Image: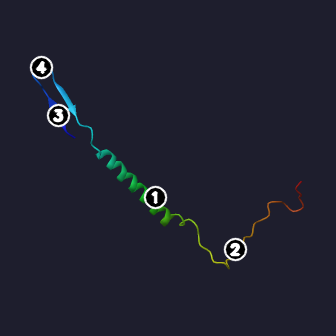
Amino acid sequence: MATIINNPNGPERVVEIDRNDSGGWAVAVVILIVVIVGGVYAWYHYRSAAVATTSGSTNVNVTLPSTFATGTTTN
């Protein structure tokens, strides 16, 4: 960023600032790329961690107790 102070022949003071810097945009783009790459990495490495893998011959037997007393009916 360039700061130019121009004081021609008198007490009036003019300050001109050059605002053509693109450093903020570069930082924002780098942060955005890091967030996207981190999300892709997490998606590929952690998305299936909660799902247990099973083979095709897996047999799960569950026995549930009866919730009704003997001789009762439901309508």
Q: In which quarter of the image is residue 8?
A: top left
Q: Nearer the viewer, mark 1 or mark 2?
A: 1
Dot 3, how many residues are within 10 Å of its Cα: few (below 14), some (14-19), or many (20+)? few
Location of the N terminus by quadrant is top left
Q: Give residue 39's mark.
A: 1
Dot 4, how many residues are within 10 Å of its Cα: few (below 14), some (14-19), or many (20+)? few
Q: Which of marks 1 and 2 is nearer the N terminus?
A: 1
Mark 1 vs mark 4, CA separation in Å:
57 Å
Q: In which quarter of the image is residue 61?
A: bottom right
**For the residue labelled by badge 4, is the local secondary structure a helix, a strand or a loop?**
loop
The residue under label 3 is 4
- The residue at 84%/60% (across/down) is 69
The residue under label 4 is 11
Mark 1 vs mark 2, CA separation in Å:
35 Å
Mark 3 vs mark 2, CA separation in Å:
78 Å
**Looking at the picture, which amino acid does disc 4 mark?**
Pro
> Observer-nearest residue: 60 or 48?
48
**Looking at the picture, which amino acid does disc 3 mark?**
Ile
As drawn, 13 above or below 3:
above
Q: Nearer the viewer, mark 3 or mark 2?
A: 3
Location of the C terminus by quadrant is bottom right
